[in-house]
Amino acid sequence: MKLLLQYLKDYKWIVVLALVLAAFNIGFSLMDPYFTGQILDKFINRHNELSRSEYTWGILGLVGLAVGAAMVSRIAKNFQDYFTNIIVQKVGAKMYADGLKHSLELPYQVFEDQRSGETLGILQKVRTDSEKFITSFISILFVSLIGLIFVIVYSLSVSYKVSLIYAASIPIISFLSWFLSRKIKTIQRSIVAETTALAGSTTESLRNIELVKSLGLA
């Protein structure tokens, strides 16, 4: 994690911008049910108390605000994805280049018992995992955290009981997610190890076949 943060330091302002856009995205996205509730509470449920003009223009005004919030959310989402892709591509390429450079600087004894394609597979796996982690952190974890805070603050204005129930469900869901993901990670590690070894064997075989063909032995 510390190593990943060192790479992200070079693009910290882009990361901050992507996080701000993610906050705008989820914030304005959650405004839609708020405006819907306002339409129901202030106009539809009180249509007998309002004049036709107040009823019509009030609903149209809130619908316009909901449409505007949805547009801002969508625009923020597009820019968020754009800057996230920039971060992912730059960090992934830099990590891959540094890993390859470090591998070439290691002594031969480190590689004599390792397949040539296995090192390349490990570097590609590290790059792919880092890219997925950055994308998931910005698009899922951070957005979920902002949404969680938004919902808790709003539910406090409605009823503290709703907030208590909502807050009590968080550790339960977190524990279940951690428990299930732990077993999945164990299985995934074994699959990745076998896949990397297979990729190394395949690359080694292809190189040997190419060598045999180049020597005119086949």
Image (spheres, helix red, strand yellow):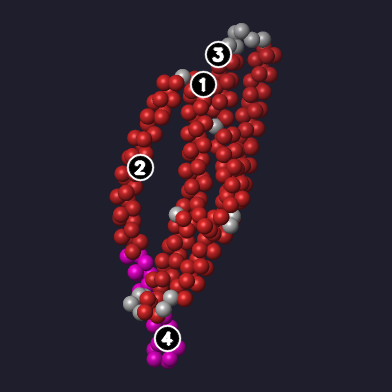
> Do labels 2 and 1 touch, CB within 8 Å?
no
Left or right: residue 87 compared with residue 112:
right
Question: In the rendered view, would you say 113 is above or below 189?
Answer: below
Which numbered disc flags the more N-terminal residue, 1 or 4?
1
Q: Secondary structure at mark 3?
A: loop
Q: Secondary structure at mark 4?
A: helix
Q: Which residue is mark 3?
A: 45
Q: Which residue is mark 1?
A: 157
Q: Position of residue 117 (x, y in %)?
A: 40, 73
Q: Which residue is mark 2?
A: 177
Left or right: residue 203 compared with residue 139:
left
Q: Is residue 217 magenta?
A: yes
Circle 1 residues within 10 Å: few <14, some 14–19, many ≥20: few
Circle 3 residues within 10 Å: few <14, some 14–19, many ≥20: few
Left or right: residue 19 compared with residue 166:
right
Magenta extent: 194-218
Work out which quarter of the rendered image holds the N terminus and state it.
bottom left
Q: Position of residue 30 (x, y in %)?
A: 54, 32
Q: Report, in whole angstroms, how far the alpha carbon at label 4 lies from the one at label 3.
A: 80 Å
Work out which quarter of the rendered image holds the C terminus and state it.
bottom left
- Residue in the image at 65% along x and 15% along y: 55
